[in-house]
Image (cartoon, coloured by chain):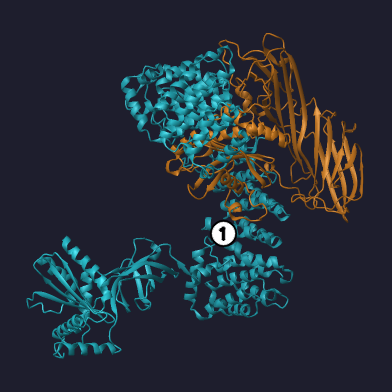
Amino acid sequence: MAANWAERISAFSRSPSRFLSGTTAEAFLAELLRELRDDRASYSVKVLLLSPLCEHPTLLCPSDSVGEETALELMSVFAQCPSKSVQFHCSLLLAITSVLICTSCVSNRSRASQDFVDQLLQLSQDTGDLQGDGALRSLRATACDCLRELEACCPGLLSQRLELLGALRLKETSRIHQAYAGLHTLVLRNAVYQLAQETGAGADHLKALLGGNTSVAWEAEQDSDLMNNKDSSILSSLILGPMGTIPTLQTGPDCKELRSVLSSLLEESYLLTPQCQAALLHRLIEVVAMVPGVPPAIFRAQLLRLLGTSEVGLLHSTLLLKCAFTDSLFSAEDEAFILKRLVVLSQHPLLTTPEKLFYTDCLLHFPENRPISCGDGDESLPVLLTPQLASALLPTVFNDSDTMLSRLNLLCLVYLEEEEEGEEEGKGLSYLYEHLTALLRIVENGGSREIVVTFFRAAFLFLFYFRHVERFSGGLTEKLCELYLRHTRLAPHLINLADQTQERLSESTWAVGFLRALQRVITEAPLAKLTIQDLSRHLKMLARVAEEGEIPQHSTISFLSSVITASSSSLCVSGDWRLGNSVLGVCRRLLVHPTLDSLLNALADILQHLAGRYGDTDIQDHARLYYTLLTTLSKEKLAGVLAQGASEGGRQVAKRTLSCIMSESEELTGVLTIHQTEKPIVKLVELDDSELQEEKQMDRESDSSTNDTCPDEASAAVRTYRAQFHHPDFPSEIVLRYRLTYTEDHDPRFDQLFSIRLHFNLTDDHYEELGDTSVPCLFRKRTPPVVKLRLKPWRPYPTVLHASAIFTTQDGLSWHTLLPDVRVLFQQTFTPLPAPTTWGTGGKLKVFDGLWDEICSESGEDGATSLFCCQLEEAALEALVEKHFLPYIISDPSREEEEHKVLLFLPPRSHMLLKIRREEDAVHFVIATDNWQLLPHANSFLVTVTSSQEDR
Amino acid sequence: MSVRALWIISQEKGENVSIRFSRRFSTVEHRAKSLAGSSYVAVPDESTVLQLLLTELGLSDSHKSYVALRDDCLHRQRSPALELCVDGPGKGLLWPVLTISQGSLILACLPLVDAPAEPRPPLASLLSVSQGLTLLAGLQTFLLGSGSKPDNEGLASRLATLPSVLLQICPLGTPLDLPLLGAPATSAAPMPTGNQKQPAWKTGLHRGRAVVNVALIETVRSMQYGNRSRQDLWDVYGTVTCKCEVEGVLPNVTVTLTLPPNGSPLQDILVHPCVTSLDSSILTASSVDNYDGSAFSGPYKFPFSPPLEPFRLCSYTSQVPVPPILGSYQLKEEDNQLCFSVNLKLHESVKNSFEYCEARLPFFNRDQMGIVDLKVSSGQLDVSKEKNLLVWVLGQKFPKSREVTMEGRISFSGPTPGPTDPLCTDLTAYIKLYFKVPDMTLSGCCVDQHLVQVYSSAKPRIVTSRELQSKEYFIWNSTGTAPVSSGQMML
């Protein structure tokens, strides 16, 4: 079981989230607690079991209440277990501390946390171990550490106990006085900080605080402070240097009590381990910085000891002293001494590399007494760091990479400053350049990967500072070109250097000059010696060169042309797909090069040659495509299509599609393929009523003929009417009108859409397939265009259409997007009776009567009648008719008839006739239709419209 | 002043990587969260940390010659604080990750930043950085021992004790001490009751005979080019190591270093934290200053109260006028043969009595040695088994003339090529000297037995010793291009 636990705990700590995905936090916690209570488990296992609670308490106790319960549980384990295993006891205290702090129980001052603090305070006072029980002593030390951590996470928690803690510290003579000192100092620091935040707090408050008899009023205030203290500034270091502001406590010169506490702490600091000494000094610096009544000179007695120390932490606290108190504690000579000391330590043979690098870093952030630059956190040289002094830190080829680069950076800054001060171009700069060439020589002689990378970083640094010194930057270009020809495998490094210098040093032309030089050496080198590998790297390089509009590309073109056409070249025959792609990569960049006009013929020849002769079909196809693009598109369009792809993909291609493995063709693919939007971009919205009326009005203009040529008899009218059905022009479609608008998703890429092609798919077979609809453009800021959908029903039932759109965005990319489904409602299939245009209303009425009679009498297979009743007020009924049936009413509205006759035509050939009239008890909708299958739809339609009318 | 997490990783050139130990300090993490506010970046899982760390250290994908993420020339790590770019949920920059590595072991920790995250505070303002470095260095020494080769079993057993070690020295993420090396001294007794506080760095009390052992070791390094355009360089540094077995809670001991009458002053003196007080004049001389003839030149008094274990009391550097052994190395290439002319001269001020002295001449970028036709005026010549290294054992004494020579030729006609080196190409070659001279120092500095004072009841036995040793002592072939070394002399 024990072995099992070890495995499980280590699995948990490797990846807590993965471990908990196999179980639950709750179950695992329960298991841990059960095992902790189990007497059979050994203490070493139990210590192990506590580690998840120490390391990830919030994962196991996701809420404050679980934390509280867990802490209580652990405290009871603590109370019950015999004091045999000190290590288990100590670990328990740590686990409880972790749980209480991390679940915010402490900051909420929960019951358990208060009990725990009391218990820790008791433990810390329990000096029963004076007889020499080392075990109990380490428990006391751990209790102090836990209290310190509680105070660190909840500043002010123990402010009220300051006097007690001070007394305990003084009394303790065993090694663990260190733990008491650490606790006491931190509580003191936090208490002073809080006092300094209080308005009106002064010497008396400080005295009272140290004496332990805090005034009640202040206590109350402080409590509320603690509760509301969401501001983390109290956790931050208060050593900010001359530019920072920190809260101060005005005490006047008389703060004897504080001074005596500080002196006693400082006097005994020697007895602490260097780590604790450094931490103690840090806290005391903060206290003195907050209380102007205590002069910084209180630290003076410690200074020499600290300045001579070999301990990095102690010297660091000296620097912090310097930062906090500058010239009120350190004279100009002291400053010069410390600076020299830092230079010495930055290269001291007995120190470790990280320590030396740390000191080098400190040189660039040296806390000067009178800083010239404002402390904006950036590297700056201290005034006293002269070239003479800095020469001790000149980089050499024997340095490790980190040391070398950090020294080079420092020395570059030094010589840059020297140069700016107008002194002649110093030997220092020459030395750095010589150093760089020495590195280059090592790279040339086959230096390891690490040296190669280091060299290029050094080269970048050098250029970063001294690109303007022609003599050296030009020399470097030459040397790099030679290096490249000898080691073409360095191509990615060189391209990276060109990219970064171009990007970071945008005002400099070094990168372009460098690429130009590379182009020259590549194209001038004898072809005979060229290996396939070199060629592939050359092509990568030339592709990069071709990205520069300023660099003429004739030599590249002739290089390409000789490479692919030379009889000696087996390139075309071999049909190497990768190489072909590299060649195409260069061509592609040439296609968008500003000097394309002058390259046109030669490039076309190359592409044609590739298209015809290259031994790989894919390459041939691509070459043909380029050739076609080159010969058919205008220069602007070509640039538009290709440059677009390039700028979108950029050099660091982020998005990869499966269709293009080679990054060369990828950019193009972006332009030539259709992208899919993640979310719907546009939608179709029905026109609202007023818009609809407007639209229909326009349609109806022609409807107002007066010559009534309708036959007199109803059945004859129906016959004439029906005769139209056989006429090919008979309109058997319904027209739906929508606005094409944006969805809520606000993606600026899609602010302007062009050539939108809408495509619809049916979801059933009631309608004939729809053709696509085109909309010229859609701009977010303009009125959305109206889209007419012409639906040809087979059966006039409600339906749903799937819609999608393909469009182009301003940047030239094509997109495909899905639209929300379009619902066609039953009432949208209604159309007015398509009676011959020469008929008047009378004619339509005759058709109505004729059809009505036919349906009622004939009771044909498909005909049916039905009655729908509902309760409606007079006005409501009129409104309903007005709203839903107005275009279809054929009874003369001017004659005050008692019933409305409504004739609905539903393409292709169905009719629905309504007689709407008021009876005593209700409104009757008498329905007659020649297609009984419409009745359920009619019914639900009437239910909908009448109920919505009732609601009014 | 605290660390959020600690990792111990073993690897071999980027292969066989594994996290051997890790520890998160949840309460420090809790503080990190409140301090960083919205810019808080959580510590990711072990495996993620591991992968990011290896990339930053240039150890990932060791078979690939260029990886953009790893090798970008813009990307200069501001060592010793690395920046890990955490991707995915909770992404951001994890900074400052401190690492130290020795052999196959990498130790890393993430100190708490107790300052506003923007703009990024300088390392100099974060005490947790130096504390973290000290913690890592202490753990490294504990795990690997000082300098000795790491043995896997020993490492594993020490790793297993780490949880209980950390319980002592860093229970809640705040380093309190460094791990003790080995078992505490057996004679250590618990504290008697009294008013004198026991130093926290003293694990117990010594009982028994008082013995004070003071050892002074001077190390000399040199780069000799034998070329007018490049000045030869050498430097000397000394360390004083003490082992004091003295009774008392806080016994007082004073060690005094003295120089001969016209000796140049000790510079760059660094002292152990147990030194109680220092005279300011001791610290004034610095190697980066122009030598000031009026500088203080001793005696150098170091009053201290010793810890139980051996410790380095102080260290210094010194500028001596001449190197102990002046060499000249000349090679000429003649039809795949190298003609040798080597001369080594022992300076008259150096005691001609070595514990050992040997010169090594490695050869790179050549085939193995074939015929070796060399004559030495003194000592004995060995060819290494791999036939790419010549070892000239000079033994305990130079001849009376204090000068030795080696002449002759070697043909590199061996069947297989020897090792390669990017630095030592063509005629760039060196001799590396290894020697140790007991009972002498170059600076003339010594610890006078009578000037070791111990203020205690019993009269202590006092043992002092001194020796000179070489380290990185190179003599470059003057006919080849020597790699540029320090340019101090040019400026």
Could you tell whether A817 is left or right of B184 in the image?
left
Q: From the viewer's perspective, is residue A840 above or below residue B147?
A: below
Q: SS of the residue at dot 1?
A: helix
Residue A750 spot, x, y in % from top left: 39, 65
Q: Residues within 10 Å of mark 1 (few under 14, many from 20)?
A: some
Q: Nearer the viewer, residue A521 or A747?
A: A747
Q: Residue furthest top?
A: B457
Q: Nearer the viewer, residue A520 or A911?
A: A911
Answer yes or no: is residue A804 visible.
yes
Query: Where on the picture, by quarter, is residue A893?
Result: bottom left
Q: Which chain is orange?
A: B
Q: From the viewer's perspective, is residue A575 above or below residue B214?
A: below
Q: Which chain is cyan?
A: A
Query: Where on the picture, by quarter, is residue A774?
Result: bottom left
Return the residue at label 1.
A499
Q: From the viewer's perspective, is residue B197 above or below residue A241?
A: above
Q: From the viewer's perspective, is residue A836 above or below residue B414?
A: below
Q: Nearer the viewer, residue A907 or A420?
A: A907
Q: Residue at x 33, y 79 (%)?
A: A794
Q: Residue furthest left?
A: A896
Residue B428 spot, x, y in % from top left: 78, 49
Three-letter code for the amino acid on which mark 1 is drawn: Asp
